Amino acid sequence: MNSKPRPRVVVVGAGFGGLTAARRMARLPVQVTVVDRKNHHTFQPLLYQVATAGLSPGDIAAPIRWILRTHPNIEVLLEEVRDFNLKARSVVTNEGVLPYDYLVIASGVSHAYFGHPEWEPLAPGLKTIEDALEIRRRVLLAFELAERQAAAGSADFPLNFVVIGAGPTGVELAGTLAEISRHVLAREFRAINPEQTRILLLEGGPRVLPPYSEGLSRKAQQQLEHLGVEVRTSSIVTRIEPGAVWVEDTRIPAQVLLWAAGVAASPLGRKLGAPVDHAGRVLVQPDLSIPDHPEVFVIGDLAYLQDESGKMLPGVAPVAMQQGEWVARTIARDLEHQPRRSFRYNDKGSLATIGRAAGVAQFKKFSLSGYFAWLAWLFIHIFFLIGFRNRVLVMIQWAWSYLTYERGARLITGSNELPGWTQSERGEATETVVAGKSRR
Amino acid sequence: MNSKPRPRVVVVGAGFGGLTAARRMARLPVQVTVVDRKNHHTFQPLLYQVATAGLSPGDIAAPIRWILRTHPNIEVLLEEVRDFNLKARSVVTNEGVLPYDYLVIASGVSHAYFGHPEWEPLAPGLKTIEDALEIRRRVLLAFELAERQAAAGSADFPLNFVVIGAGPTGVELAGTLAEISRHVLAREFRAINPEQTRILLLEGGPRVLPPYSEGLSRKAQQQLEHLGVEVRTSSIVTRIEPGAVWVEDTRIPAQVLLWAAGVAASPLGRKLGAPVDHAGRVLVQPDLSIPDHPEVFVIGDLAYLQDESGKMLPGVAPVAMQQGEWVARTIARDLEHQPRRSFRYNDKGSLATIGRAAGVAQFKKFSLSGYFAWLAWLFIHIFFLIGFRNRVLVMIQWAWSYLTYERGARLITGSNELPGWTQSERGEATETVVAGKSRR
């Protein structure tokens, strides 16, 4: 037994990067504290399934404490990090300070509204369980309010869903919304026909899924259009108001607006005194540490690093996980007085799903689209879901909803109001209206 | 084909009573409108499982629209009923008016705080999915905040959970909280020992589960105590403040307070001009209609009716469901010009669960307690869960958590604050604290 105190490692954020870093340090002679402002790790690639009522939050999120329960050298604290004192080597949280010998910052990114923070309540983005529940509430409520209006005799059926941004999240959302309105809800309404819902996917750039090859972008767009999504590329959003979005000078009515267009780095990135890029990502050294502070690492979506060809590493789970593992190895090497090495991303390929049984996949030597891309996506994502129980349950639910076109979590919780929704025309609530006048 | 317009039936509330009434009218020559302020039916007997993180909301709730999808003569509206115009035969909602030929009111009950509405935010009750998520948030957060405080060096471990009211809901909550703290969380914390959590069940009356026989009450109390619950009967709560509850002149510290003590009828009951009891329940005629209005029925928890022995029918799902069925039959008899008959409750028995593999059951000729009562409870409740998919998933999840002592929905969503929780003593967040001073 060694009586010398073990180095203390503080990990900020329990996303894919932070969690991997912590797990890989389970067998090192260090004392690890994982700090997160949520009690759960969220499997972000499946958040869109919660937003579209296919899965429950409990299916894609697990308590951080539970994930790390078997490692006695790791403790978990539910606190919010506010600042760092690099000189004193401590993390400042809402509750006090946590001293460290090594610091791993993996606090990720959130939405960016291109200088229009006032758009956020009108067009919510999708990064957390709470975001997903708010989007689910809006989507389901829109159909209910349309039914209410139509039952009251309003003639036109004005249901427009607009998704802004055609990266993987926007494509997944738009595809799944089309699927829901065409298949899941089709037979449940009496006054409206959900199949007439218009789903519009707006993209500022020239094509959907920009990180993929042009061929795959084209195939993805075809699959989206086949599902009933209207795709508009090179369409820059200039204004958002309750119930509508503007593309240049054209006003598009939209009962539900979803934002999947831009990311901004966690504000913690700017508290380090290290150089950052335009989105606030920290420019890290080849070993993922920041200049002059070999004991401070930044990983995952918050880190800016280029590959050999000068391209920025994408903000995806595999990059974060490999970086988390790299930091654990680097600390192990430090403890053994070995020299540090440069991180290299091993790109195993990219996958995006588009809807039921559609998707695109890009690997080093080949690419896939359609059913097989979707199958690859399905198995890889279920495989990586944290916790055995979740995996089995998610598979059963997907099998069930694949066979029956049903979605199991169609609950509206919270308020029954939508921004920009106009009052029904069934007439004001008054006690003098006589029977039969108001309906049918 | 009959060209005479079909009678219009409006059903207010889609709990067990309203939903059964609507379903039983699917084959009658009537046009049914079900109005509810939620889009989902909640399987209330399992709400405590959501409150204690064993099940997800989607497992015990299903969209009303989905449940009734196959019946073309039934429409569903998401609206909130505000009033009735019995003379004009119309229902006044937040959106307008709905005319009816028959009206079925099944809007149930909510919590009553015995004239202390200010206690509600301090001791939430359990009637809706939102209530269950708030209780789950408080329960899970209490352990997190205790860990945070203990990690910061605070010596004592002050975790007290107090459940007020020892009816079926209070007993289920207390038993499950004991189970969680003794088994589920036991190995996941580093600074606190969840097994030391104190769980107190306060009951104003002389025994737990008052509707059951004295022998079963005693057995239920023994099973609760075996699980680690401290039961205090004849204990009247006189005051609730943030972080504490008073029983007579004794102050009991309580980080989490849950209310399971009293019910008040839906305020709609008082809008009918019919006599009501002290809790606001409507005194219905033997055929479940109200005086002078044979076309208006009140059923379920909102109705007050006595059995042959003069005892009030209990506010449980079987009563509501049998009454819903009765109303559908009565309307069918009206349409066939048959005379009406009096409703009679067919009591098949009562069941309450206490925790993992414990419970009590009382049938006409015999009673059960312990493991077999729990098994009976389990199968009956799963059998009545709405929707095949839910049943299968709930069974799998329960089998899993029975075998592993794991609970799958331990997510804290929303705020990280608890009323009455004192600030950690780790020291204020300041940048001048030096490394090592604050922890260990």
Image (cartoon, coloured by chain):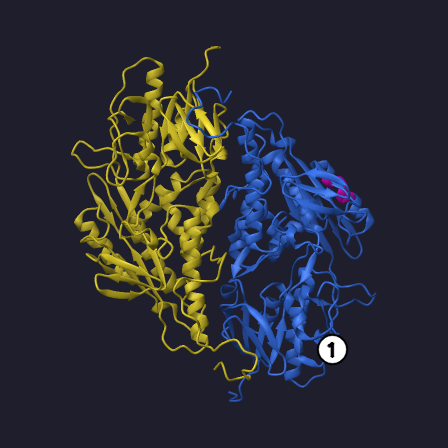
Chain colours: A yellow, B blue
Q: Residue at x 20, y 33 (%)?
A: A307
In the rendered view, does B187 fall on the left or right side of A294? right
Q: Residues within 10 Å of mark 1 (few under 14, many from 20)?
A: few
In the rendered view, does B293 fall on the left or right side of A374? right
Q: Nearer the viewer, residue A333 or A413?
A: A413
Going by the numbered disc 1, the residue's amino acid type is Arg
Magenta-span inclusion, residue A136:
no
Element under disc 1 = loop
- Residue B168: percent from left, percent from top: 70, 51
- Residue B324: percent from left, percent from top: 65, 69
In the rendered view, does B218 fall on the left or right side of B358? right
Can residue A230 be seen in the rendering of this structure?
A: no
Q: Which residue is mark 1?
A: B341
- Per the picture, the main secondary structure of the magenta-coloured stretch is helix
Residue found at the far bottom of this picture:
B3
Looking at the picture, does residue A190 appear above or below residue B39? below
Stretch in magenta: B219-224
Q: Residue at x 44, y 16 (%)?
A: A6
- Residue A57: percent from left, percent from top: 46, 47
- Residue B396: percent from left, percent from top: 54, 46
Q: Residue at x 31, y 51 (%)?
A: A260
In the rendered view, does B139 fall on the left or right side of B341? left
- Name the chain letter of the residue that bears numbered label 1: B
Looking at the picture, does residue B239 appear above or below residue A226? above
Q: Residue at x 35, y 46 (%)?
A: A378
